[in-house]
Image: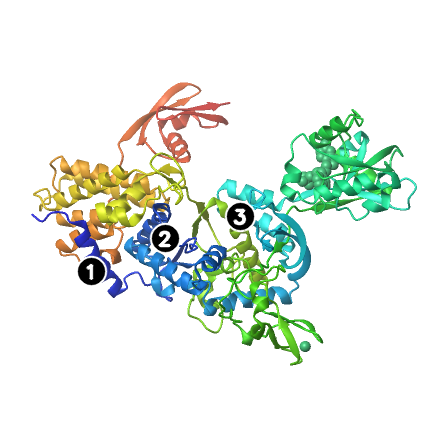
Amino acid sequence: MRKYNPREIESKWQKIWEEKEIYKTPSDSDKPKYYALVEFPYPSGEGLHVGHAFTYMVLDVLARKKRLSGFNVLYPMGWDAFGLPTENYAIKTGIHPAIVTKNNTDRFRRQMKDLSLAYDWTREINTTDPHYYKWTQFIFLQLYKKGLAYKAEVPVGWCPSCKVVLANEEIVAGVCERCNTKAQKRLQSQWLLKITDYADRLADDLDLVDYPESVKLAQRNWIGKSAGVEINFPVKGKDFSISVFTTRPDTIYGVTFVVLAPEHKKLFDIVTKEQHASVSQYIEKAKSKSELERVSQAKDKTGVFTGSYAYNPLTKEEFPVWVADYVVGSYGTGAVMGVPAYDERDKDFVTRYNLSIKEIPLENIESITEKIVKSGFGRKQTNYHLRDWVFSRQHYWGEPIPIVYCDRCGMVPLKEEDLPLKLPNIEKYHPTDTGESPLAKVEEWVNTKCPICGGAAKRETDTMPNWAGSSWYYLRFCDPQNIEVFASSDSLNYWLPVDIYLGGAEHTTLHLLYSRFWHKFLYDQGLVPELEPYKSRRQHGMILAENGEKMSKSKGNVINPDSMIEKFGLDALRIYLAFMGPYDQTMPWSTSGVEGARRFLARIWNLFNSEKLSNTNSQILLQELQKTIKKVGSDIDNLKNNTAVAALMSFVKEWEKGETLSPDAAKDFLIILAPFAPHIAEELWQSLGGAFSIHNQSWPAYDKELIKEENINIAVQVNGKTRAVISLPQAVPQENLIQKAKQSSAGKYLEGKEILKEIIVPGKIINFVTR
Ligand code: ANZ
Ligand code: ZN
């Protein structure tokens, strides 16, 4: 008997499958489609670790099962390859980012192929490829033309020591990631995308999709739709008012002060001479705090009196006006009415400064709103916490923004036929000390001609953020080689929406929201067919080191799939990854678990090489197999790969007890094993004379008759008296149970009576209460 030698089998089949392109997805097919998408990775220098492998296995099993079940499955992979780490690495080593990217993607691809992930590699995409980013730039131009891409002065992170603009991800705990200097803020002109125009639809259309409730909630909170009232508090001795935004107009009679944000435009119009110095000093200090620090400060809320007073327009009662940085300038009107009796923040504030608290009963919210609006001092207003998306970066390794500045014509977009605007190949990507992008120094590139008048013009030198390329990549997978359009409408009509999208929780309010925004915009332009890109979304857990710590390079506890494959074989690794637990859990790694998976596969190997594979089927085992087919199939469909593997294991245990299985039945077993352990399944399949390849077969149908569950007896009662006993399968749905009970001989006791309710004791009794 041949011994189970996984590495030999595995490399043999990997080669054959790749040659025969068995995972290639035809673009036209009569089969129903299924689009399974997992977030494409940023190809870091560290390569894949087992956490990636765990995630990829979740959909790999599903995609394989869907193929076997007769779907035309789109299951693609690519690289989200622009971004800072690559640029920083290039600065450190002097190796060009394009070369770093190539090396890293080559390594990732090799590792994924080593895991036998069933991607259609002919559809591979790379966001740094000009053939790809041509369309990222194209979409930007459409946004620009519709007024949804605009420039404005916004606060950006700034490192005074490195003299560079810091992206949010470069500010770690308030300091510059590189030199640990405290990050500052400064105003700089940036590109923004008007995602706020889509706030309502982004929130409302969550009703159309199947996402985890936690994800929907997080997106809704992030969008932060808030209905309230703007109320004008006239300033004493001035001819203007301070307008505040409140969601609690019912507390208006409890107001004891008004507070402005340090950025409020009218602040210095009301600050008195006496208070001028202390207010100026205060707002200087506030400048160094981030918005998050400001709104999350606990009890220590600070502020300064402006010297002025405002009054309640309904009662003419007067209050002091303060400035305090717990009010943010960019939300609502940048001013708040202080109601310490009802608002915790206001209460902290008055406690600190000894201001008064007024206890009052609440008004009816509708009638007081009415009253305020009628008085002429207020109006209803809906605000959103969502901000426009800051879309430019002062870095090299990103998509150039296709805009030029002409002295005569102003800001001019490139013509679509001139795309892609390629990133010039340069040697120095160091940020400039002026805060401009490194591209600003590349004169041959910056100086260009105006697309309108042909006169001298300068290119925009900012690049796009790394969120750009990932905002539409699922569209490109539908038709990755198209040079006329980003994807043909036929291909989009066929493949969209993505049926399942698996990714990480960290993308909930960034990538996932950004891509929904782009999609809706493209939908409005008639460029994509569906309102939502992803029909369902699932979020995966994380793999920790054996001791429960996070895996990280610095801790030196990263487990690499390559070493596991080397030691135990790929099928064993795959079985372990599928078996280790529910896909959405965070769990510690266990190398002995992989060893156990290897032993399990060796047991299967031995069964197929023993007299337990014979020409007769044991009836019991055949019945067991039908149940296993059913369970494994429905578990995979529900992403419960761990319990599917458990079912395979318990079947193997039954088989080992001495019963026999015929080759035909054994082949069915191999097909349901194939999504998890594709190599051993193919090898044993071939040894039974199966046609190439097992991965192109059909998922076996199970014999419903054989898995009929045993029936149970249920007493049918009418008003507590047993009138009949019926026999039904255990898992019968409630409606069927009620129907069957009425049709039984107890039915005549119900004639002409009104049934008030049915009381069901599961598995035992159904009692009709009648009148
Ligand atoms: C009086 C009041 C009484 C408030 C009360 C709340 C509770 P959301 O739901 O987030 O819209 N607010 C308004 N603008 C603000 C700003 N720029 N910075 C900080 N806080 C601001 O919250 C709206 C509430 O947050 C508003 O309603 C206002 O305080 C405060 F018992 O007005 B409220
Ligand atoms: Zn011009």
Check the image and report above or below for 129 versus 629: below
- Residue 278 drawn at (x, y percent): 80, 39
Which mark lies nearer to you, 3 or 1? 3
Real-space CA distance between mark 3 and mark 2, rounded to the nearest whole angstrom: 22 Å
Real-space CA distance between mark 3 and mark 1, rounded to the nearest whole angstrom: 54 Å
Check the image and report above or below for 743 versus 420: above
Q: Is residue 676 visible?
A: no
Q: Name the residue under label 2.
A: 47
On screen, residue 510 versus residue 358, left or right, reads left
Q: Mark 3 points at which residue?
A: 177
Q: Mark 3 near ligand 1 (CB under 8 Å)?
A: no
x 34%, y 62%: residue: 121
> What kind of residue is marked 3?
Glu
Q: Mark 1 points at which residue?
A: 692
Which mark lies nearer to you, 3 or 2? 3
Indicate which disc, 3 or 1, sits on the residue closer to the N terminus.
3
